[in-house]
Image (cartoon, rainbow, N blue to C red):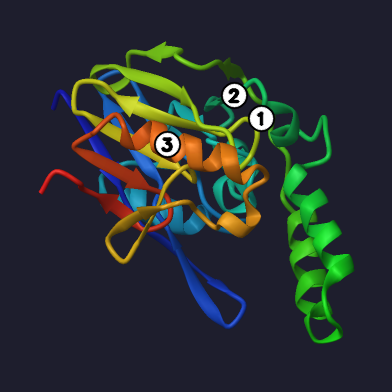
Amino acid sequence: MEYKILCFPITMPFGNTENTVYPTLLWDKQNIILIDCGFIGALPILEKELQGHGLSTEQLTGLVLTHHDHDHMGAAAALKRANPNIKVYASAAEAPFISAQKKPLRLRQAEEIQKTLPPEQQDFGKAFCDMLRLVEPVGVDELFQDRDHKDWCGGCRIISTPGHTPGHISLLMDKDSIVITGDAIALEDGLPVIANPQYALNLEQAATSMEKLLALKAKAYLCYHGGICSLTD
């Protein structure tokens, strides 16, 4: 095996429904890198998925967090406890929110929205804020800047894609022309869209970042919300 790039689903209950997200695994002879790790409590599901590929959490060498939202880093602290040797990567701009050096921007946003909700939505808003407060911080071992490069799976370039959050990053797999979008692009009804635009901390930047990734004309876009988007058919 030279290397594999795997996009797989994690499904968990969310209120009265279910929410499915798609982390990505970069697996070569030297590295096994997970891109985002799911919700609070997702570690057992993640472990089961890895076992299906003949892997364990203890074999992971790295965890890249595209940003600090709960559905991307919710299981990060638990994963770090299960595998203390795993190296955590994030952008320099996002790291303070991941490590709790600064109050998470998403929690600040939720608390402000909570103040404006009508009475019938107050309970949901409070529950959402409470859930965000339960996200455990995790230390970041290596800070990324725009255009940083790693040798993972034939070459991986870090792309700054702010908007959803200020320090959001995506990854371009150079050799295979694959973009791992994080929340810079979501897949809805087979089309690329801005992920949850109502929650983008800077919607104009989010639109620019999506256009930036689509301009790469990659063979595939691995979207955390929606799965694999191919625009070359």
**CA distance for labels 3 and 1:** 17 Å
**The residue positioned farthest toward the left in the image shown:** 233
Which callout, 2 or 3, points at the residue further toward the start of the chain?
3
Residue 94's disc number: 1
Crowding at dot 3, Cα within 10 Å, few <14 / some 14-19 / many 20+, comes out as many
Q: Amino acid at mark 1?
A: Glu
**The residue positioned farthest toward the bottom in the image shown:** 120
Crowding at dot 2, Cα within 10 Å, few <14 / some 14-19 / many 20+, comes out as many
**CA distance for labels 2 and 1:** 5 Å
Contact flag, marks 3 and 1 (Cβ < 8 Å): no
- Please name the residue that numbered disc 3 is placed on: 34
| Quadrant housing residue 138 | top right
Q: Is residue 20 visible?
A: yes
- Residue 129 point in image, percent of width and height: 79, 62
Residue sitting at x 59%, y 29% = 84
Contact flag, marks 2 and 1 (Cβ < 8 Å): yes
Q: Amino acid at mark 2?
A: Ser
Q: Nearer the viewer, residue 74 or 204?
A: 204
Q: Is residue 219 above or below residue 86?
A: below
Label 2: which secondary element: strand
Q: Is residue 75 left or right of residue 192?
A: right
Crowding at dot 1, Cα within 10 Å, few <14 / some 14-19 / many 20+, comes out as many
Give the mark toward the camera: 3 or 1.
1
Q: Is residue 80 above or below residue 198?
A: above
Residue sitting at x 23%, y 34% = 218
- Please name the residue that numbered disc 2 is placed on: 91
**CA distance for labels 2 and 3:** 15 Å
Q: Amino acid at mark 3?
A: Leu
- Quarter that holds the N terminus: top left
- Residue 203 point in image, percent of width and height: 60, 46
Q: Is residue 135 left or right of residue 191?
A: right
